[in-house]
């Protein structure tokens, strides 16, 4: 593992970026076509974010849309009471 103090360096060197929240405006320029972004993407709320992500060329996966073969959320996501977060 490598510890890096600058977020931009982490983003630019990563093939997979996993976030809890949608990318912030300062993070969009760090995305590239070689990256996959796995995060919450409520794109209906922001046309600008949608266009910026398309412009970056990255592959975006909205984790709120990932379901199993029966159309259900993965078990851990369906039972949020079992998760804890620090904000």
Image (cartoon, grey):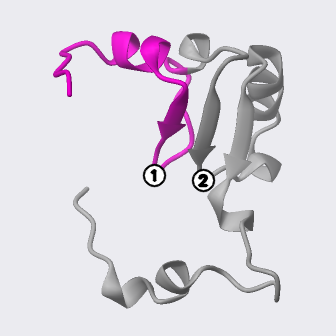
Looking at the picture, how far across and down is residue 77, in whole percent? Answer: 52, 78
Image point (67%, 18%), residue name? 34
Residue 9 lies within the magenta run = yes
Q: Residues within 10 Å of mark 1 (few under 14, many from 20)?
A: few
Looking at the picture, how far across and down is residue 7, in whole percent? Answer: 33, 18
- Where residue 40 is drawn, which disc sits there? 2
Looking at the picture, how far across and down is residue 57, in whole percent? Answer: 78, 19
Residue 4 lies within the magenta run = yes
Q: Tell me the magenta residue range.
A: 1-27
Viewer-side residue, 8 vs 52 = 8
Instruction: Using residue 73 as the reference point, say whether residue 70 is left or right of it.
Output: right
Q: Quadrant of residue 70?
A: bottom right
Instruction: Using residue 56 as the reference point, say whether residue 2 is left or right of it.
Output: left
Vertical comparison of 71 with 40: above or below: below
Q: Residues within 10 Å of mark 2 (few under 14, many from 20)?
A: some
Viewer-side residue, 10 vs 41 = 10
- By secondary structure, the bulk of the magenta-drawn segment is best described as loop
**Circle 1: element type:** loop
Vertical comparison of 10 with 59: above or below: above
Image quarter of the C terminus? bottom left
- Where residue 20 is drawn, which disc sits there? 1
Image point (49%, 17%), residue name? 26
Q: Quadrant of residue 37?
A: top right
Image quarter of the N terminus? top left
Q: Quadrant of residue 65?
A: bottom right
Mark 2 or 1 closer to N-term? 1
Image point (33%, 87%), residue name? 82
- Cβ atoms at labels 2 and 1 below 8 Å apart: yes
């Amino acid at each position: 593992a490598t510890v890096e103090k600058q977020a931009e360096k982490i983003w630019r060197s990563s093939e997979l970026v996993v976030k809890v929240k949608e990318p912030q405006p300062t993070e969009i320029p760090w995305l590239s076509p070689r990256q996959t972004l796995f995060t919450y993407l409520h794109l209906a709320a922001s046309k600008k974010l949608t266009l910026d992500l398309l412009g970056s060329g990255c592959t975006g996966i909205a984790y709120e849309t990932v379901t199993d073969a029966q159309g259900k959320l993965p078990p851990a996501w369906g039972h949020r009471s079992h998760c804890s977060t620090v904000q």
